[in-house]
Amino acid sequence: MKHSEWKPNPSAMAPLYEQIKDYLQTKIINGDWPVGTKLPPQRRLAAMFDVNRSTVVTALDELTAQGLIAGNSGGGTKVINHTWNVMAANPPPDWHSYVKAGVFHPNLPTIQEINEAEFSPDVIRLGTGELSPTLLPTAAMQDIFQRLPNRMTSLGYEEPKGNLFLRKQIAHYLKKWNIDAAPSSILIVSGALQAFQLISIGLLQRSSTILLERPSYLYSLRLFQSAGMKLFGIPMDEDGLQASFIAKYKAQSKAAMLYTIPCFHNPTGTSMTEARRTALLEVCEKEGLPLMEDDVYRELWIDEPPPLPLKSRDRSGLVLYLGSMSKTLSPGLRIGWVVGPEPVINRLADIKMQTDYGASSLSQWAVAEWLVSGLYDQHIHFVREQLRIRRDTALQALQAYFSPFATWTVPKGGFYIWVHITSPLSMRQLFETALKERILIHPGHLYDPQATQSLRISYAYASLTDLEKGIARLSSLVKQAINHDKE
């Protein structure tokens, strides 16, 4: 049950408890909350509706008396709908059994909580992996859309692989990194996330295993697991994924593909060295192991440009190259791309046409205009300057408040700082306590089940003031958690 946008009206004639009771009753009777639905705790309902807990208790007591809900000490309060008119009629479908029967795995519980909390305006978001609204080019985007009527030929569906004009611009754009890709070898997708889904259902068998860095952003998703696949982590060091383990782990797991984020890795911020990239590609070529190169952070370098992509040195069509505008320009455009051998791109394009009939035509024309106009290069230069300021502010705050009990990486670009707490504490408890204090963090276990003493700090989203304030307040909560575990 998600956060409700509805709130009782204090100026209305009906008492607040009665308004809440009527709202909940309508949800139950209309079938929005079927039998078995678990209601949020009373304190959370009170926060959702901006009322005292006693008001919520009175409303729930009314619903209990009507036979619509029931509570117990172990399972919380649930919808039961034991009213006479319901019992006398045909029973409604058990939607909860349908929900549980779905083949797609639900998000991790912590991810669900994060997704919900991110839309609370008073929360300091120290983990969010996207640019701050203040860094998004709102004014320039308006200019771009005003230009489109002069270039757009249609608002209809695009070709299966995407808008040809956009694919030509991306092909030209990739040349600066020595990637020679024909438009026919490029597929436009609705963000890199969709690329993962297309690859999982279009290229891999259900029992497949994917090698990847550990920790990795991919552990926080359930795409591949929902497709019946396994993830097998490879250790990292300061140079990136340790390529020397690939052959051994491929043999152990019978892996079908390798996934890597070489530039400003999510969540550690590590950027793979030139030597490590060469070694990685050599091992994959020797082992005949295809790989997905997720390069969505490449443009976000701060200190110096990263080494050229793996795809730039790929001479055997081994690499599927993923790019996106979500991290650099606008997550709302939902435009990314996959570069690969034409048979692969044709296969993925066919599946994409079956699932959504193509990414937004308007967004594709807009991204093409960003690239051809030169405005994208100007915007990226601005973003890099701002990320430098934000990164340095976050590092200074960590040094001031976290140095007695933590270590961390110093990223050369991207969004993330990987923080390791050196004293034992419950990261789950820290997450819950921080959220009560209106600070949202991303615990390390989301990216590696064994990273129970780590967390991912993002300097991209929160304001400079909130970055420093949030890190300072979080340090106090960490100290309390450490002292509590010592007792």
Image: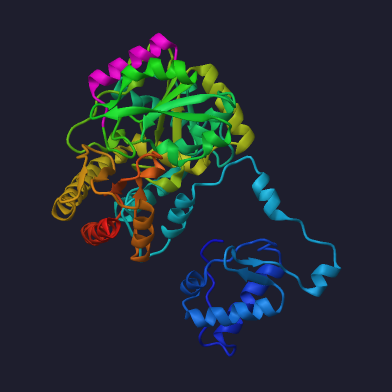
Task: Say which residue appears at 32% left-offset and 36% top-offset.
Answer: 297
Q: Count up the numbered dots.
A: 0
Q: Residue furthest top?
A: 286
Against 204, residue 11 (above or below) is below
Q: Is residue 102 magenta?
A: no
Q: Position of residue 317 (x, y in %)?
A: 43, 14
**Front position in the image: 163 or 278:** 278
Q: Position of residue 283 (x, y in %)?
A: 36, 13
Answer whether residue 233 is visible to the viewer in this image.
yes
Answer whether residue 293 is visible to the viewer in this image.
no
Can you say which quadrant of the picture contains the C terminus? Answer: bottom left
Q: Position of residue 339 (x, y in %)?
A: 44, 24
Against 171, residue 121 (above or below) is below
Give residue 12's quadrant in the image: bottom right
**Front position in the image: 255 or 272:** 255
Q: Residue furthest front?
A: 487
| In-image side of 207 versus 165 (left or right) | right
Can you say which quadrant of the picture contains the N terminus? Answer: bottom right
| In-image side of 166 versus 442 (left or right) | right
**Front position in the image: 116 or 420:** 420
Give residue 80's quadrant in the image: bottom right
Q: Position of residue 14 (x, y in %)?
A: 60, 88
| In-image side of 228 versus 456 (left or right) | right
Q: Which residues are magenta?
A: 271-289
Q: Is residue 272 magenta?
A: yes
Task: Say which residue appears at 26% left-offset and 61% top-offset.
Answer: 480
| In-image side of 313 versus 201 (left or right) | left
Task: Say which residue appears at 29% left-offset and 60% top-offset.
Answer: 484
Q: Main secondary structure of the magenta part?
A: helix
